Image (cartoon, helix red, strand yellow):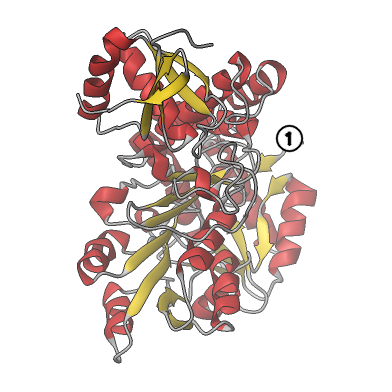
Amino acid sequence: MLKSDDIIIIFGSPHRAMKAEKILKQAQLPITLIPAPAGLVEGCALAIRLAENIFQAVLATLAAAGMEPSKAFRQTPTGLQPVEKAA
Amino acid sequence: MADIYLDNAATSFPKAPGVSRAVAEVIDHLGTSPGRGSYRLALQAGRLLFDIRETVADFFGIADASRVVFTSGATEALNLALFGLLQPGDRVITSSMEHNAVLRPLHALQQRGIEVVRVPADASGLVAAHDIRAAATQGTKRTRMVALTHAANVTGTIQPIEELGPWCRAEGILLLVDAAQSAGLLPIDVEAQGIDLLAVPGHKNLLGPAGTGFLYVREGLQPRPLNFGGTGGDSTSPLPPEELPERLESGTVNLPGLAGLRAGLLYLQSRGLQAVRRHKAALLEQVLSGLKRLDGVRIYGPGEAACHAGVVSINLAGRDPAEIGYRLDADFGICVRTGLHCAPEAHRTIGSFPDGTVRISPGLFNTSADIDTLLQALHVLAKG
């Protein structure tokens, strides 16, 4: 489900995750809705997976729509590590 | 003898074209639970639910679709608003024209220490805005909420929501609007009209299936849930999440019904709300002008089509409304509702308690010929 350096972002609710997916797909950013990895489920069992090279574009697009993910993580050899969200 | 259905204030029939197909489509091809899994079909169901919510929000001028909480109908929406936000010691202002979906929760809340002030309407069913304002500002206790129907279900009388909304907003008083008879017929824009809480059934003028409806909750309000249960995420938390809409939507949502509701909304948008209103107003005008030519008919409410929201209540002098309803059905195949219409105080207000009235509520798919048949039937019945 995740490969090295993939980024996942999570939201507080399924509605917000669906809204984020819609916004990002409308912006033609290649993201995928996936199950939130175990331990990261915070009010929502969904997460958005994206490649690291579009992370800032994703954040900027969401910010322009008044949306912000609650948390972001990077897949590393030792597992998921929190990532600063600031662009 | 084909039935002529004139009880659309109870529920619309027939539904809009495409509604039953939309329901069946979900049941047959997308029968999964949105927000309860992340396989493709569940995500598809979740996306559909999201789209439906956005369609509803767009229809009612709601900027943030997450503030649309789906319910089983207007009754649940009203209960959620009233039980979710009122606390012992609060004062709530309402009117004598309310449906039991407002009266009964308020009665129960009164027993829990909430002060309920019922403002009387005039004989046409109209609640004066200045009477609401006076009731809300009298005494020293702060009023927490005004709970008012947009259009009375017995007489169709349209209440002055546009006037009260901005005033309530300026006074810091919550405005809860029961839009059971108005949503899909009268223009509603929650922002423009200053509505904090809007309770809407999906199965009346919105032409969707029974078992659908919603409560709009203005940003900043956080009602206590009526139901506690699964919301699809954060399962270890002992309480529902803070986020709307999930906080107030425990359990599996009625996706087939909501898909039907969306089909109803899209149909109304394609026809145009003004055209819908014009058609229904023309039918009501035909009803009213025809009734005025009949001897022994008493019309309740304003008596002008422009002031009725889809409903006219009548009685024939000296006759039991139940008998009139029975004869209309048995002899002419005409379906109307008789009695108190779950609004006893409204009948006390207009002078039709305890027998009630014969309520005529044409729908979008009724024709002028249907009304002619009704008027001919009433002419026969009025003669004895």
Residue nearest the observer in this picture, B358 or B259: B259
From the viewer's perspective, is B192 left or right of A77?
A: left
Q: Position of residue B63 (x, y in %)?
A: 30, 40
- Please tell me how many numbered marks the rendered image carries: 1
User: Which residue occupies the extreme right position in the image?
Assistant: B330
Residue nearer the viewer, B326 or B82:
B82
In the picture of the structure, the residue carrying the numbered disc 1 is B2
Answer above or below: position of B331 versus B368. below
For the C terminus of chain A, the quadrant is top left
User: Relative to B229, does residue B131 appear above or below in the rendering?
Assistant: below
* Quarter location, residue B318: bottom right
Q: Quadrant of residue B51?
A: top left
The structure residue drawn at horizontal position 71% and vertical position 62%, both measured from the top left corner, is B324
Which residue is pictured at 27% across the width and 59% down the height?
Answer: B162
Q: Residues within 10 Å of mark 1 (few under 14, many from 20)?
A: few
Secondary element type, mark 1: loop
Nearest to the observer: residue B159 or residue B147: B147
Compared with B341, B262 (above or below) is above
Query: Where does the image place residue B264, in percent across and percent down from the top left?
Result: 52, 31
Residue B195 location (% of width, % of height): 32, 56
Q: Residue at x 43, y 74 (%)?
A: B94
Left or right: B2 in relation to A67: right
| Residue located 33% across and 87% down the image | B141
Q: Amino acid at mark 1?
A: Ala
Chain to which the residue tagged by mark 1 belongs: B
User: In the figure, B92 relative to B13: above or below?
Assistant: below
